[in-house]
Image (cartoon, rainbow, N blue to C red):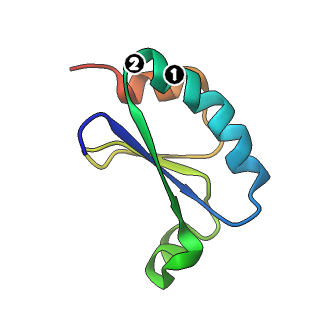
């Protein structure tokens, strides 16, 4: 999914809400979309991200865990 940023979230995650406040304006500006994945739906994802959510991942597999800044997100989604 080119130009789609994946956000790994958990149930009732207030940090995920904070992350989305940072992410949404940047994605809109860059013409990207957000794909949210709730890790509670997969044991493998819970094992991998359980203590790290929110985590963002670019289409090429780059990850950044919380906390992250708007500048860090911009660098991840910048055009090549």
Q: Nearer the viewer, residue 34 or 75?
A: 34
**Position of residue 3 in the picture relative to residue 25 (left or right):** left
Report x, y in % for residue 45. Answer: 47, 73
Q: Residues within 10 Å of mark 1 (few under 14, many from 20)?
A: some
Name which residue lies at 74% across and 48% down.
15
Residue 3 x/y as whole percent: 30, 33
Q: Which residue is tagged 1?
A: 26
Instruction: For the C terminus, give its image quadrant.
Output: top left
Q: Residue at x 53, y 77 (%)?
A: 41
Question: Helix or strand or loop: what does disc 2 sit on?
Answer: helix
Task: Give the vertical position of 52 relative to 3 (above or below).
Answer: below
**Residue drawn at 63 percent across, 46 percent down:** 66
Q: Could you tell whether 78 is left or right of 47 in the image?
A: left
Other-residue count near label 2 (Cα within 10 Å), few / some / many at <14 / 14–19 / ≥20: some
In the image, 8 versus 62, the foreground residue is: 8
Label drawn at residue 75: none
Q: Which residue is mark 2?
A: 30
Residue 50 in the image, given as x and y percentages of width and height? 60, 71
């Amino acid at each position: 999914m080119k130009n789609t940023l994946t956000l790994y979230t958990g149930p009732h995650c207030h940090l995920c809400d904070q992350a989305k406040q940072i992410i949404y304006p940047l994605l809109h500006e860059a013409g990207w979309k957000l794909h949210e994945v709730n890790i509670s739906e997969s044991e493998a994802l819970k094992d991998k991200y359980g203590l790290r959510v929110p985590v963002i991942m670019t289409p090429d597999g780059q990850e950044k865990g919380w906390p992250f800044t708007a500048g860090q997100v911009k660098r991840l989604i910048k055009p090549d």
